[in-house]
Structure formats: C-alpha cells, structure tokens
Amino acid sequence: QVQLVESGGGLVQAGGSLRLSCAASGGTFSSYTMGWFRQAPGKEREFVAQISNSGGTTYYGDSVKGRFTISRDNAKNMVYLQMNSLKPEDTAVYYCAVGVGGVYQYWGQGTQATVSS
C-alpha cells in the first residue's frame, strides 16, 4: 500500500508560480511512474504531467506544456510540480498518483491551487 500526501497549494495571482510537493510512503518509490492530475469544479479530472521511475522521461498535458515542470527525488520519496506563468484556468485541486503496470492505482488527497485574475 502506498500513501501519498500533497502540499504546496495556495492562492496566487495570474502570472505567478507555485511548487507542489507529493510525499510518498510505503512501496518502492523508485520503481513507480508518478503523475500529477487536476480537477476543477464541474470538470473531469485532467492529466497534467507524468515522470518515469528514473526521472529520465516526462510527459505533459497540452494545456501546461512549457509552463509546468515535473521532477522527482527518489532519495526523498518526493515528486514535485513546478507551476509557472499560472492562469486562472489552472485553478483546481491537484492530485499526485502512483502508476503501476500502466494504471494509476494510488492517489493522494489533493491540494487546492487557486489563481486569481
């Protein structure tokens, strides 16, 4: 069983930055693909970014490419999401998740990020 705890959300003005963190415990963190997703009120959950177990490969959703950066520290069992040039439409609850066998199986409780215009 893997437990995930996100932090770092908050209120920021448009154009600002936030850095989200996700602390993992249980399991073998360095073997997992990790991802960030988000869900805004009234909308479906949206893929944001993914990073391979080694950190060597990353993928991003089209809406965040060039603005967000995913990274990880396997020694600390942490994954991060650096969010720059934030827009009001980035307002959402952000979740980190563990990918096993191509399926995201474990999820954190989420952290709210709100971008004011």
Image (cartoon, helix red, strand yellow):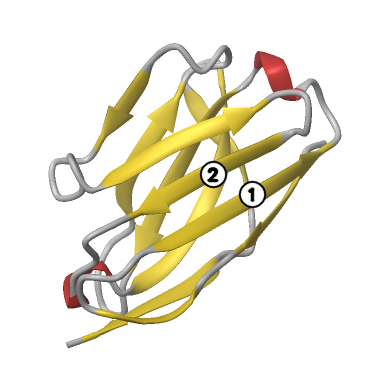
Q: Quadrant of residue 106?
A: top right
**Is disc 2 surrounded by few (<14), some (14 to 19) or many (20+) residues within 10 Å?**
many
Between the residue at mark 1 and the residue at mark 2, the CA separation in whole angstroms equals 6 Å
The extreme bottom residue here reads: 117
Secondary structure at numbered mark 1: strand
Locate the C terminus and report the quarter of the image it occupies: bottom left
How many marks on residues?
2
**Which picture quadrant has residue 66?**
top left
| Residue drawn at 54 percent across, 48 percent down | 96
The residue located at (35%, 38%) in the rendering is 49
**Amino acid at pointer 1:** Cys
Q: Is residue 55 above or below residue 116?
A: above
For the residue pair 57 and 34, the one nearer the viewer reads as 57
**Residue at the outermost left position:** 62
- Which mark, residue 80? 2
At numbered mark 2, what does the secondary structure look like: helix, strand or loop? strand
Q: From the viewer's perspective, is 63 left or right of 34? A: left
The residue lying at 48 percent from left, 75 percent from top is 112
- Location of residue 1 in the rendering, given as x and y in whole percent from the top left corner: 82, 36
Q: Residue at x 78, y 33 (%)?
A: 76
Does label 1 or label 2 sit earlier along the sequence? 1
Q: Pinpoint residue 85: horizontal percent, then vertical percent.
A: 21, 61
Circles 1, 2 touching at the beta carbon (< 8 Å): yes
| Kind of residue at badge 2 | Tyr
- Mark 1 closeness class: few <14, some 14–19, many ≥20 residues within 10 Å: many
Residue 90 vs residue 14, the one in the foreground:
14
Q: Is residue 34 left or right of residue 2?
A: left
**Circle 1 sits on which residue?**
22
Which mark, residue 62? Answer: none
Please state the horizontal and vertical placement of residue 79, each as a whole percent of the image. 59, 39
